[in-house]
Image (cartoon, grey):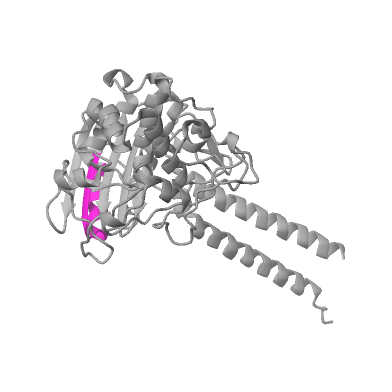
Amino acid sequence: MIRVLVLSLVTLSAVVAWNISVFFATSEGWLKSPIVKSDSAPAFAAAAEEAVTDEHTGNLGMILIEDGEVAERYFMSTGTPVDGSSVYQVASLGKWITAWGVMVLVEEGAIDLDTPISEYLTRWQLPESAFDPSGVTVRRLLSHTAGLTDGLGYDGFERAEEVQSLVASLTRALDASPGNSGVVELGAEPGSEWNYSGGGYTILQLVIEEVSGQSFAEFMSQRVFVPLGMERSTFNHEEAIRLGLAQNFNLNGDTEPFRWYTALAATSLFTSADDLALFIKAQATPEGQSVLSGQSLELIRTPHASQMGADIWGLGAMLYAQNNDGGYIIGHDGNNGPAINTVARIDPATGDGIVILSTGSEMLATELAGEWVFWKTGNIDSLMFLMSFEAMLLWMGVGSLIIVILAIAFGWRGRRPRLH
């Protein structure tokens, strides 16, 4: 009996040790090597270009920034050529820019981060809930900690005529992504947990309209894009058409039009690689732009939400990984149908950054940006960890099973009677 107990404890300890080792090997990149050994931007660009050539059908634009200046540019397309001025719909990446619009109003004193959003709304209010709506604040909406459980995800509409009003979309979005009801509601205690909510940013779109007295697209153009010199950026689909859109490729290599959205703040920014380069450079050089103060920029990248013990979100910006200088690589990714994948990331401490806009691949831009973060810092970013999660669980399961089988075999062998 003692032998069985000891063997069981040893087996359990081995399983726990194995799973802990696999977790840290995945989260810390113990077995991972940078995409390129050289620390030069041209070397990284060459490695990225090789990956794009091997894997990508569609179009893609990439800009690398070193010390606040453009260091490398790479563009490709299997259709109409693209360049730094080509305009893409960038999906959820627009949430980061939306946060700048919100912070403009915060700096003016028109919005307070910790005032219940109900005080700013006249056209719509959250539906009744078991939870206290006064805890739903601008700060929590920006950081996805307001207790909203919509899980949106908007798929958009094929034609402009189908687009709902903002109030109708908040009540029930007809273009909700599969598996979501489209209802924006309070399903958890505000401040208790992190839940990604596209609906929260649609509420912020309404807040900006209510407080500013302008349409969301007009406000963002006048108060963010024009001051930053982002001449090929808009939340207005018709204006984006006039600017000239890059082709939108699906996973089969065919083209189709970009979709129309009510939820502009959450998922329908149109911009170019050159404009996004201007935007991310502004994160590291507050003295070079007049939109937000350095204090607001610092607040945007201050941790406001965490998962599994890791800080993952500021106010509108994702915190991808520690930058080894007391801060974080920050930015946002965008991903939407049919195959839109966009990224913009920067280390504010160094002014190093990356922009990738693509259509035609599901996650290539995110994967390359994750490689850039690891190349720069030696740290696995949060999205790269999530993409490795299934493989990590598989290794945990297989290793644990092997340990248990070996333990059973060892125990069974020990019980066999000896022949004399």
Residue located farthest toward the left when viewing the structure as drawn: 80
Q: Position of residue 74 (x, y in %)?
A: 19, 45
Is residue 260 found left or right of 116 in the rendered image?
Answer: left
Position above or below: 224 against 72: above
Residue at 50% x, 55% y is 389
The picture places residue 48, in percent across and down from the top left corner, at 26, 49
Q: Residue at x 44, y 47 (%)?
A: 198
Q: Which quadrant: the C terminus?
A: bottom right
* Main SS of residues in magenta: helix
Dividing the picture into quadrants, the one containing residue 85 is top left
Which quadrant of the rendered structure holds the N terminus? bottom right
* Depth check, front residue: 158 or 397: 158
Where residue 166 sits, quadrant-wise, is top left
The vertical placement of 394 against 109, above or below, is below
User: As drawn, is 211 to the left or to the right of 131?
Assistant: left
Instruction: Find out whether residue 62 is within the magenta segment.
Output: yes
| Nearer-the-camera pick, 33 or 209 | 209
Residue appearing at x 18%, y 49% in the figure: 245
Label count reads 0
Residue 367: percent from the left, percent from the top? Answer: 36, 50
Q: Is residue 34 visible?
A: no
User: Would residue 185 be counted in the magenta stretch?
Assistant: no
Residue positioned 77% across, 62% down in the render = 7
Q: Nearer the viewer, residue 413 or 360?
A: 360
Residue farthest along the top direction in this orientation: 287
Visible residue check, residue 374? yes
Q: Residue furthest right?
A: 1
Q: Which residues are magenta?
A: 44-63
